[in-house]
Image (tube, rainbow, N blue to C red):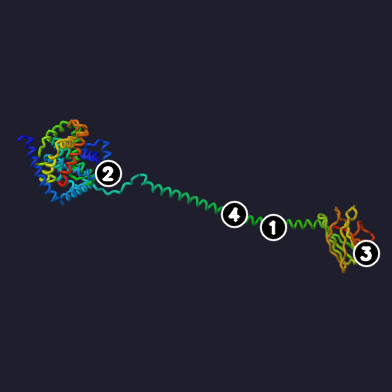
Amino acid sequence: MNAIAQTDFVRVLSTIDTRLARHCLLLTKTVNEQATRDHDAELLQRIGAMDRSAFAEFYDKYSAFLFSIASRILNDASEAEDVLQETFLQIWAKAGDFNPKLGKASSWAAILVRNKAIDRIRSSQRRLRLAQEAGVEYAAGTVVEETANGAVHGHERARLIQTALVELPPEQRRAIELAFYSGLTQNEISEQLKEPLGTVKARIRRGMLKLRDQLEGLL
Amino acid sequence: MIDERMEEQASLHVLGLLTGTEQLEFTRALQSDPELQALVARLSTATGALAGAVPLVEPPPQLRAKMLAQVTPPQKTVSLPEPKFRVARWLPWAFATSLAVVCAGLFLQDSQLRKTVGDQARQIGTLNQLALSLEASTNSLRQAVLALQETNRMANLRIAMLNSLAADAPNSVAVTLWDNKRQDGIFVAQNLKTLPTDRDYELWVIDENQKPVAAGVFQVAANGSVRMEFKPAQLIKTAGVFAVTEEIKGGVASPTVKNMVLASSATR
């Protein structure tokens, strides 16, 4: 089975499986999810008050998740380690800025580490090469068995999230991935995809809204 | 209601794709729009899930201790809150010092004023005593002046005794007090005989080297006495002799010598 055929097969299976699992999750969801969000917000509040034990707990919970993101963007373990340290130092210093109304703690931390990593690759002029590498990998729609989401949300939920991403139309997913992982600007994405800027923006909007709808109830 | 453009901006925002100006405008809109905040929250959650859809890579185990070593909480020290402005800390002291200086100045001024008032009160007392003394002196002087005036007046007076020249009234007598300066005098007579109603006595002042000057007519009481003030009709330089004549009613311009009943022998 070639790569494209394998992808289609997995996508079909995942779709069937995802719908069932999503219904199950929606039915059982989740007092625990809200409790987790509240607990994370409380952790960040305590970190903002210079509580080292809260910081240690937050590190234990999210370090692998964040390190995975940094490693994925930078494709370099040493630089990812530096970025992770910078990110946690920023969390230590800026935890008081976290606003629960604007998202989950895990999302807030993920965007922090992503921005740190992007800053680093922008300074090293490696964006286009990394963007091209990301493009090759994700254009294939690779299904990763064990993701960073698994470390935070559990394996079952991580698998459903992965499936939801795979279900995005390829052109939308590609634009979103280039934006998030490569740190390219709107115009650079437009050039990379050889599409008009307006088309790129529209794809990103539709893709993000679809992703939001697909993940509704999972996170 | 969030339109497509705002949905697009929110999507670009969570992926870090907004430019500087766009980001500022969107952040401003986000702060005041709860619906937009809810959309961003859901898109951020989706972005977090997207971020986590990468192969899991565990960080180096030693990194945990390294991280915890870097986040030492700041030493808790007890210190008084620093005033926001250094000037504010000195302001009460400056105010108190100024107040003390003003109070000291006022105290000194009060002392000086009290001393001045005391001195002036003493001076007023002294002046009052001086005024009383001067008033007493003035009264004394006034009395002295009055006494001197009286003495002077007495010095100016001429007293003349008029004796009887009438055979039928040999006991008649009169006295004149003449003030030459005032050109008037008092005439007092006793024991003169009473005259018929068509006749009057007439007093004469005879100036030295001058003609007799009439000084008034009069009648006597039943007991033959009379007292009258007189003032000659002309200026008298030196009153030499005083005389009384019996004349027709109302008097005459020149005395009738044969009818002279009284005359002074000398004056002093």
- Circle 1 sits on which residue? B139
Amino acid bearing label 4: Ile
Instruction: First in sequence, mark 3 or 1: give its number.
Output: 1
In the rendered structure, the answer to whether residue B15 lies left or right of residue B158 reads: left
- Circle 3 sits on which residue? B166
Label 1 SS: helix
Label 3 SS: loop
- Circle 4 sits on which residue? B124
Q: Quadrant of residue B186?
A: bottom right
CB under 8 Å between discs 2 and 4: no
Q: Quadrant of residue A12?
A: top left
Amino acid bearing label 3: Ala
Which of the pair A123/A6 is nearer the observer?
A6
Q: Is residue B180 above or below residue A167?
A: below
User: Residue B184, how many percent across, how many down?
Assistant: 83, 57
- Circle 2 sits on which residue? B31
Amino acid bearing label 1: Asn
Which of the pair A11/B162 is nearer the observer?
A11
Instruction: Work out whether disc 2 and disc 4 sit on a shared chain.
Output: yes
Of all chains, the one bearing label 4 is B
User: Residue B103, how many percent across, how many down?
Assistant: 45, 50
Instruction: First in sequence, mark 2 or 4: give its number.
Output: 2
Instruction: First in sequence, mark 3 or 2: give its number.
Output: 2
Q: Residue at x 91, y 56 (%)?
A: B253
Q: Quadrant of residue A147?
A: top left
Give the Cα separation between the discs numbered 2 and 4: 84 Å
Label 4 SS: helix
CB under 8 Å between discs 3 and 2: no
